[in-house]
Image (spheres, rainbow, N blue to C red):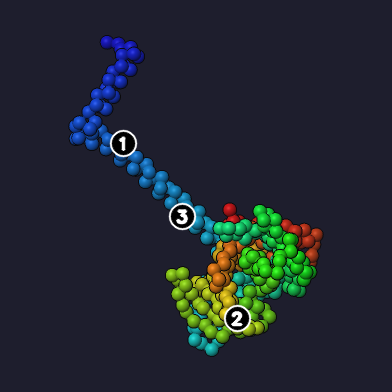
Amino acid sequence: MRRTVQQVKIKSENLGTRLWDRLGVDTAETVYICTPYVVGMLVIGAMGMAGHWATKKLYNQADNEAITAGIVSAPSIDLQAPDAGPLLIQSYTELQGGEQAWNNLESVEYNGIIFNEQEHHSFMASKSKDGSLNLRVTNRSAETELKIQGGQVAWSPEPTATEQPAFHVLSIAQLTREFYNPLMQIALTHSGEIGDLRETIWQNQRVIAATIQNEGVITELYLSQKDLTLLQRTDIFADGSQQKYRFSGYQQFNGLRIPTMVRAENNLGDMSNIRFTAINPILKTNQMTAQNHSARSALVTASLLK
């Protein structure tokens, strides 16, 4: 017996109507009908979440492997030994790119953004081993700008006598003013020394704490026990004020390990995030070719920053 399309359609509609009418009347049949659909949806959802987790884990693993490529673990250091300080400095320098590479560093060019919940600044900067520095910080929404060039500081507009410079500006200016961080300063210029070494807990991990005193400022550094990565720096000044920096997102640029993210805080509750979007360390070479010269203006973009 042949059925027309209309008959099949009517029969399907009647079947659907009967099933819909029975739902909620016969509990056993309701469970029997709905269970496969519910289970199927849960399985599909679980598979999607598992796929997302696996993809993210593999992606992060690939990123971590790229960042730590060529980085070996730090040697075990007896922090109570008489030579613990010099050994820490030597190991730190080697793990961050080597003393020769850092000695060959002539200048650094970089740009990025500084932000918190209220404000957003962009900056471009360069600093040289000879002490020269250039910094331009711009807040487009507030139409303010700071320029430091050749030792001259220019504000636009000029702040009043009662206005204080934004914490964002002070934090990036401090980082730009220094050519080396305190540990690298000791390693390469033999200026200052480590006064105290100990093991402590920071952010639920065991770290090495190192204290340095230089020109009236006490600096406390937290370093990873695994590879001596500088994780946090706290500067304590003579008046009791403090400035804290947390470093992350380390990458290799021309063989040097440099952080691409900095979180700056002070003891007054001010906070800013500094995100470097491009970094170009310029190293001294025996032959300065035209290609080397052109590389000075080509910033190496940080691949982690998305």
Secondary structure beneath dot 3 equals: helix
Residue 282 visible in the snapshot: no
Q: Is residue 156 left or right of residue 164?
A: right
Establish if 214 lies above or below 260.
below
- Residue 27, position as x, y percentages in the image: 20, 35
Q: Quadrant of the N terminus?
A: top left
Of the residues shown, which amino acid type is indicated by label 2?
Answer: Asp
Q: Is residue 186 left or right of residue 83?
A: right
Q: CA distance from mark 3 to mark 1?
A: 30 Å
Report the residue marked by disc 3.
Answer: 57
Report the residue marked by disc 2.
Answer: 239
Badge 3 crowding class, 10 Å Cα cut-off, few under 14, some 14 to 19, many 20 or more, is: few
Report the residue marked by disc 1.
Answer: 37
Question: Can you name the residue that lies furthest to the bottom here?
Answer: 82
Of the residues shown, which amino acid type is indicated by label 1?
Answer: Tyr
Specify the quadrant of the image occupied by residue 253: bottom right
Relative depth, front residue between 56 and 98: 56
Relative depth, front residue between 10 and 157: 157
Q: How many marks?
A: 3
